[in-house]
Image (cartoon, rainbow, N blue to C red):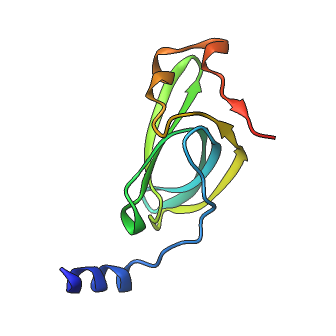
Amino acid sequence: MDILKEVSNTLNVKKDNPSFKAGDNITVHYTIKEGNKQRTQLFKGDVIQTKGSGLTKTCTVRKISHSIEVERIFPINSPLIEKITINKKGKVRRSKIFYLRGLTGKKARIKEIR
């Protein structure tokens, strides 16, 4: 098991992304490959959960686009993710805020830490 950890650590370089948690509003800049072209696309939304640790850490980001709820899971240390920026720090009491899925409008707002 130790050999597997050493090999994975040498192959995957850990990125220095900002620390964020559930309730924060972030923008993820990630690369999309279409044929032989590639471009950067932004995904701006609220973090619902963070899962895992180290190189296998993932986060689920939720946004509402044209009254359709979209959730996407991003591996934090993926080479396709260029950068992550924090827009707002949110104040929530839970580490996984799945209750937002059933809420719309003003009830789905998250208080901001100033």
Residue 4, position in %: x, y? 22, 81
Using the rendered view, name the quadrant where residue 3 is placed: bottom left
Count of labels in the image: 0
Q: Is residue 93 left or right of residue 10?
A: right
- Pick the front one: 21 or 55: 21
Using the rendered view, name the quadrant where residue 57 is placed: bottom left
Residue 65, position in %: x, y? 58, 25
In the rendered view of the protein, which quadrant contains the N terminus?
A: bottom left
In the displayed image of the protein, which residue is found farthest to the left? Answer: 1
Q: Is residue 100 left or right of residue 29?
A: left
In the displayed image of the protein, which residue is found farthest to the front? Answer: 93
The residue sitting at 45% across, 62% down in the picture is 36
The image shows residue 96, relative to residue 101, as above or below, that is: below
The residue sitting at 59% across, 71% down in the picture is 16
- Pick the front one: 65 or 12: 12
Residue 104, position in %: x, y? 57, 13
The image shows residue 108, relative to residue 52, as above or below, that is: above
In the rendered view of the protein, which quadrant contains the C terminus?
A: top right
The residue sitting at 74% across, 34% down in the picture is 112
Residue 78, position in %: x, y? 44, 64
In the displayed image of the protein, which residue is found farthest to the right? Answer: 114
- Pick the front one: 35 or 66: 66
